[in-house]
């Protein structure tokens, strides 16, 4: 490794821009003649829109237009799509209700847009919005799955009777029934996985610019995947053909999944820009973010696990109700199915698994992938189950896990996934050592003497990342391929541009991707720029989510760089009058091995572009591209252990220690990996202790601001002790597994297991607020 | 935010005169409540009259048996004031728990008491210490000042100029913060006055704003010790109940926080 190559904790190149206020976000875009959009949103969770009277608003100063849902439907802008087809157990396709970008007739969640005001300024648009009179006829609403599936519940969509979208199953039900009939012990558990609001720091924003002469649109948008946005806007929403639509996602301030989707506001901005003949900007505020950014999680699950007399798992049976909110968001259908139930084997050798997932509409904000997406729900369920089982079987929780760990790889689980490699004992051992697991009993006794309840909780997670082999996901219903593309351009002076279909919205790609180039070609990362987020610059790409950018995106870059190297070696060999096979690349030079003959990269590059003296038949230039499609998912895994104290007087939890031992395969930049783990753990702990998007029975959100929705803050979190136990991923040449979601996937079970250990009661839901914990301690 | 006219007053009298001229004027102090409400378009004052730069409204003074904090003094100044820390450390400590640093640099005691948020911290100290709220018109005893949620004895246009806290024998504050807002989910201020009284005020818990708790006062008067509160029972009726704290949880917190406040008072 060079000083800036693979494995070096290089300081992030992009941070100077971010921390000096020089980042360029969508809201920074100002175009000549730009207008501003303000959406009129439903205050009701369920209502008929009987009429919209904009006459008074249209007379106000600076108002350009007031547009509504009927008009957008009349103009044949397509309804929002869901990109993954799921089939119910009876063979029927999922039942999807129509979702127009603005509601022409019926609103189904608080915050759904019914109209938009376009005006000369943001404030004027807001003034005018107050003058628009919307006549609603309120309908009964339902906010949670338990109520929504009852007979007689308010119905959301005629297409989905009983509010049911699908009833999907995976695994072998007979094998599971067999396992339970042979069981020495059966452990049962009910858990809910609380709904979360993603809350990236930057709210969503869009600037749409229609050029009438060219019939061409440009969209600046806060997207994690601008190419997917263009594809969907073009192919399904009838905005414009792809060559007439440029999508730019510049600096984006965090996404966590919520910026994967193409939202109504972007569609409306594009459509409105053509209608009013001027650029249109919309920037959401925090309330709009709470109301309209896709939420995460929201499962209600009953699970049972069968054990033999030696505490080996025989079978696992799971039934989950997933709350989808009022509409099916872009990848919503895949989250509680192929991203959840396929991980239900956890780190354990489970011979038989059967899971049933019932997807349900409610009058709430749509739910989709949020950091971890399905895998946190799976991991939380399994790891609470293991802890519950250990308590019921009266064995040490770590020992029970070890009894059941998968130790032979590759391992085919009964739920599709084939784990390629891992060493689960190594990570658990490392975490146990780091926290002095053996000494816990003594510490617990000491804390007790001081009136504190101390607990320890283990969580051994596994996730499927590096999303994903296109053929495999295609066979499971995905509407897209999940490969990645890259192009490596060596300029005539030897500096390099890398174009990637991955999108950085905080992850640090500009540094990490440059480190690979530095590693391969021996040039400093300052001579490499990473270009992303613009469909006019990068031909195509699938974007960033599912911890895929290093495992898939960086591998695509590697493939392109290998092609560059191969051509450059031919040029160097020709110039040095040597055989191509004797050329090696060292410190930015192409050398004839075993001699002192060398030519520096810039000279090779120059030769490629002057083309005065190239090998016969070689094309000029030094630029190569590659598409990389992974052969399997990657399987990051690890062990988290949390030690904490509960104050019995208030129910408040205080961390004593939190250790993580992760296996991410090869680390390109350990410092950036550490940052990813810290952020993920914060979100996992946030889910366990603090965060909860709550609706009342009528579908009114009661946590639509930071005064009520508890975002984790620094002083809510412990100081983490991180470590790594590494098995290299055999599925990609760099051995990378991915690190972006692990913390959010593994942390919450460790925290709840520790609290339930501390208080000696197992029945505790997330978020474990002080009130809840206190109530559980004192419950009869 | 709607259109408004901003005035920077240089004296209390000028501020009062400007207020009288405006059709729907509002005083602005630290702006930590008023500005967010205006940004959300929930308030639309015709005129905003800034008190924060009026010299006679800023400062902390401890003399004899009284700690006086002028109305536009930010929480940060109180939290770090040697005079306050010496005279009534519990008040300086309370100020250090308000919001975050940005809020403490801006938010003021006058704004806090004028606003009388049922979960604000200062009302607890004001009521428990039996402080006097001084205005441009009169002096109001704490017992007569708080009138329920966001309601006070202030008349339209009346300006709080200072708050005078009698220095107690002992005082302590214990706050259990609301997890999201960090206001008081329940905060209890206990004080033993020089006259031999015990006064206990609770914020964040009651449906009718800051309140005294006679049962705890009696128990502490008989025996100034945390354990004296063990046998007190706090009914949950009349207490707030929401996502972050049910009424019976708050009833429990009143007791637990009172005990911790006594321990802190020494
Ligand atoms: C994020 C955040 C967290 C907070 N956390 C806490 C907390 O933990 N605990 C807590 O107690 N508070 C908290 N606050 C409130 C804050 O500390 C202030 O005390 C409060 O906002 C009012 O003070 P201000 O000076 O900002 O008043 P302003 O917002 O300027 O004014 C508030 C009201 O009082 C009136 N007013 C102001 N000064 C006077 C005066 N001298 N005479 C008459 N009327 C006047 C104004 O007209 C207005 O109606 C928090 C605020 C924020 C934004």
Image (tube, rainbow, N blue to C red):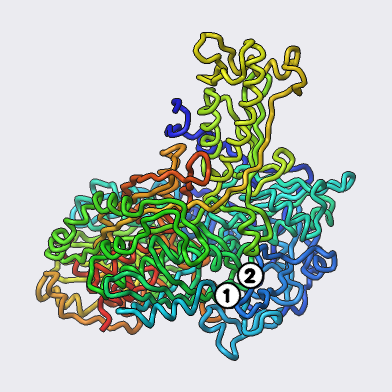
| Left or right, A312 with reference to A623 | left
Asked if labels 2 and 1 share a chain, the reply is yes
In x, y percent, where is residue A97? 70, 74
Element type at mark 2: loop
Please name the residue shown 67% across and 62% down the image. Answer: A83
Please name the residue shown 50% across and 60% down the image. Answer: A417
Pick the residue in front: A717 or B229.
Answer: A717
Using the numbered discs, state the Cα–Cα distance from disc 2 to disc 1 in whole angstroms.
8 Å
Element type at mark 1: strand
Instruction: Tell me the quarter of the image containing the C terminus of chain A.
Output: bottom left
Please name the residue shown 44% across and 40% down the image. Answer: A667
In x, y percent, where is residue A40? 69, 66
Is the Cβ of the residue at disc 2 closer than 8 Å to that at disc 1?
yes
Q: Is residue A515 above or below residue A206?
A: above
Please name the residue shown 55% across and 68% down the image. Answer: A337
> To which residue does mark 2 refer?
A86
The chain letter under disc 2 is: A
Q: Residue furthest bottom?
A: A152
Disc 1: CA contacts within 10 A as few (<14), some (14-19) or many (>=20) = many
* Lower position in the chain sequence, tag 2 or tag 1: 2
> To which residue does mark 1 refer?
A168
Q: Is residue A273 above or below residue B117?
A: above
């Amino acid at each position: 490794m060079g000083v800036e190559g693979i494995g070096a904790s290089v300081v992030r190149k992009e941070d100077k821009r971010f921390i000096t206020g020089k980042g360029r976000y969508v809201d920074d875009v100002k175009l000549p003649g730009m207008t501003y959009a303000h959406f009129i949103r439903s205050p009701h969770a369920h209502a008929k829109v009987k009429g919209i009277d904009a006459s008074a608003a249209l007379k106000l100063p600076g108002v350009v237009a007031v547009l509504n849902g009927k008009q957008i439907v009349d103009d044949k802008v397509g309804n929002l799509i869901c990109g993954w087809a799921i089939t119910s157990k009876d063979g029927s396709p999922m039942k999807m209700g129509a979702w127009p970008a603005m509601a022409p007739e019926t609103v189904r969640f608080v915050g759904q847009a019914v109209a938009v005001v376009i005006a000369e300024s943001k404030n004027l648009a807001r003034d005018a919005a107050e003058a628009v009179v919307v006549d609603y006829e309120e309908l009964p609403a339902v906010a949670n799955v338990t109520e929504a599936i009852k007979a007689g519940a308010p119905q959301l969509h005629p297409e989905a009777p009983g509010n049911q979208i699908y009833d999907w199953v995976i695994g072998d039900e007979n094998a599971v029934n067999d396992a339970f009939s042979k069981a020495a012990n059966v452990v049962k558990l009910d858990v809910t996985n609380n709904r979360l609001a993603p809350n990236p720091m930057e709210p969503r924003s869009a600037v749409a610019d229609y050029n009438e002469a060219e019939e061409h649109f440009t969209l600046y948008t806060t997207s994690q995947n601008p190419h997917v946005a263009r594809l969907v806007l073009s192919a399904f929403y009838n905005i414009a053909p792809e060559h007439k639509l440029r999508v730019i996602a510049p600096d984006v301030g965090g996404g966590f999944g919520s910026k994967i989707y193409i939202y109504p506001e972007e569609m409306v901005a594009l459509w409105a820009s053509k209608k009013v003949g001027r650029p249109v900007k919309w920037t959401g505020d925090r309330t709009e973010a709470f109301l309209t950014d896709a939420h995460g999680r929201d499962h209600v699950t009953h699970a049972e696990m069968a054990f033999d007399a030696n505490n080996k798992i025989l079978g696992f049976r799971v039934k989950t109700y997933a709350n989808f909110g009022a509409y099916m968001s872009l990848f919503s259908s895949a989250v509680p199915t192929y991203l959840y139930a396929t991980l239900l084997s956890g780190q354990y050798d489970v011979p038989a698994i059967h899971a049933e997932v019932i997807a349900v509409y409610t009058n709430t904000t749509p739910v989709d992938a949020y950091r971890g997406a399905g895998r946190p729900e799976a991991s939380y369920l399994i790891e609470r189950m293991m802890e519950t089982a250990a308590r019921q079987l009266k064995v040490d929780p770590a020992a029970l896990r070890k009894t059941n760990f998968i130790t032979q790889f590759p391992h085919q689980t009964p739920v599709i996934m084939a784990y390629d490699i891992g060493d689960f004992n190594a990570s658990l051992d490392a975490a146990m050592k780091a926290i002095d697991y053996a000494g816990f009993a003594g510490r617990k006794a000491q804390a007790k003497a001081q009136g504190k309840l101390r607990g320890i909780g283990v969580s051994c997670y596994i996730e499927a990342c590096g999303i994903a082999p296109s053929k495999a996901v295609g066979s499971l219903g995905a509407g897209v391929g999940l490969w990645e593309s890259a192009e490596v351009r060596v300029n005539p002076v030897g500096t390099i541009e890398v174009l990637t279909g991955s999108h950085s919205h905080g992850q640090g790609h500009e540094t990490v991707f440059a480190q690979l180039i530095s590693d391969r070609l021996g040039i400093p990362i300052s001579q490499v720029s990473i270009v992303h987020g613009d469909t006019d610059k990068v031909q195509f790409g699938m974007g960033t989510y599912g911890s895929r950018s290093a495992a898939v995106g960086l591998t695509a870059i590697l493939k392109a760089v290998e092609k560059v190297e191969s051509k450059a070696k031919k040029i160097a060999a020709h110039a040095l009058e040597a055989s191509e096979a004797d050329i090696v690349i060292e410190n930015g030079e192409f050398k004839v091995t075993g001699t002192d003959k060398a030519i520096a990269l810039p000279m090779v590059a120059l030769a490629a572009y002057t083309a005065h003296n190239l090998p016969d038949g070689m094309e000029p230039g030094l630029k190569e591209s590659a598409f990389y499609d992974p052969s399997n998912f990657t399987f990051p895994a690890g062990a988290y252990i949390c030690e904490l104290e509960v104050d019995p007087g208030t129910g408040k939890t205080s961390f004593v220690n939190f250790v993580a031992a992760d296996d991410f395969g090869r680390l390109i930049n350990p410092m950036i990996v550490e940052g990813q783990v810290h952020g993920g753990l914060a979100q996992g702990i946030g889910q366990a202790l603090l965060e909860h998007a709550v609706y009342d029975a009528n579908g009114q959100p009661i946590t639509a601001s930071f005064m009520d929705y508890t975002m984790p803050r620094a002083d809510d979190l412990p100081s983490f002790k991180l470590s790594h136990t590494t098995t290299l991923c055999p599925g990609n040449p760099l051995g990378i597994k991915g690190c972006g979601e692990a913390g959010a996937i593994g942390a919450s079970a460790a925290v709840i297991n520790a609290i339930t250990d501390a208080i000696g009661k197992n029945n505790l839901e997330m978020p474990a607020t002080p009130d809840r914990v206190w109530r559980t301690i004192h419950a009869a | 935010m709607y259109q408004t006219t901003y005035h920077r007053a240089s004296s209390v009298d000028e501020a009062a005169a400007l207020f009288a001229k405006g059709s729907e004027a509002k005083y602005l102090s630290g702006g930590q409540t008023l500005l967010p409400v205006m940004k959300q378009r929930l308030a639309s004052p015709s005129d905003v009259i800034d008190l924060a730069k009026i010299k006679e409204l800023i400062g902390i003074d401890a003399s004899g048996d009284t700690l006086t904090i002028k109305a536009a003094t930010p929480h940060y100044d109180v939290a770090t004031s040697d005079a306050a820390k010496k005279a009534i450390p519990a008040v300086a400590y309370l100020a250090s728990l308000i919001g975050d640093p940005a809020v403490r640099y801006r938010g003021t005691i006058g704004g806090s008491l004028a606003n009388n948020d049922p979960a604000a911290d200062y009302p607890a100290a004001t009521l428990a210490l039996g402080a006097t709220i001084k205005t441009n018109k009169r002096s109001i005893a704490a017992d007569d000042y708080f009138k329920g949620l966001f309601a006070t004895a202030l008349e339209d246009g009346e300006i709080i100029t200072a708050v005078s806290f009698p220095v107690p024998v002992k005082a302590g504050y214990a706050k259990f913060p609301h997890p999201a807002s960090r206001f008081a989910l329940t905060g209890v201020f206990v004080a033993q006055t020089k006259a031999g009284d015990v006064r206990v005020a609770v914020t964040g818990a009651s449906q009718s704003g800051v309140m005294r708790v006679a049962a705890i006062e009696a128990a502490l008067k008989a025996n100034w010790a945390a354990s004296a509160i063990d046998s007190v029972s706090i009914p949950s009726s009349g207490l707030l109940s929401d996502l972050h704290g049910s009424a019976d949880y708050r009833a429990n917190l009143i007791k637990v926080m009172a005990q911790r406040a006594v321990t802190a008072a020494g």
